[in-house]
Amino acid sequence: MSTEEVKAGDGALAEARARHPQWGVWISSAGRYWATRMGHARLTERVHPGWAMTVDADSLAELETRIEAQREYEQAPHPSSGAIRADAGLGTP
């Protein structure tokens, strides 16, 4: 990907930044899309194994999909944490 192709996507990049204000989004000189969390990240021993400080992708659409997946990891308990699901026991006598 040439520098000119990257510049052509500046509008789309600005829109992605606006949609994900907690993430710094950029395109590397190699043309790869990157996003890193902004602010202070507080990690615990129970962090989901899929949680990442920085994600990358071949396209802006793929990068945004990975950012959305990270939101799910923030809300999901670690698989081995022994946390009880919110719907556990519903519908049982």
Image (cartoon, rainbow, N blue to C red):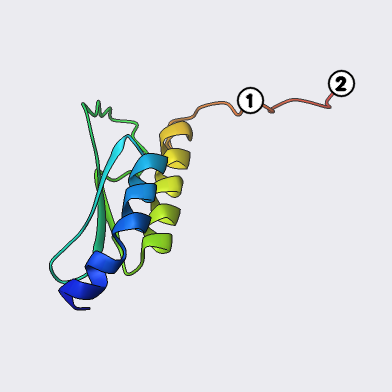
Which marked residue is nearer to the observer: mark 1 or mark 2?
Answer: 1
Q: Position of residue 10 (x, y in %)?
A: 28, 58
Q: Residue at x 21, y 70 (%)?
A: 31
Which residue is the site of mark 2? Answer: 93
Q: Secondary structure at mark 2?
A: loop
**Image quadrant assignment for residue 85:** top right
- Depth order, front residue of 7/28: 7
Q: How many residues crowd around disc 1 within 10 Å: few (fewer than 14), some, or many (20 or more)?
A: few
**88 sits left or right of 75 in the view:** right
Q: Residue furthest top?
A: 93
Which residue is the site of mark 1? Answer: 86
Q: Residue at x 51, y 27 (%)?
A: 83
Q: Residue at x 83, y 25 (%)?
A: 92
Q: Position of residue 32 (x, y in %)?
A: 23, 67
Quarter holding the C terminus is: top right
Q: Which amino acid, mark 2?
A: Pro
**Image quadrant assignment for residue 3:** bottom left
Q: Residue furthest left?
A: 29
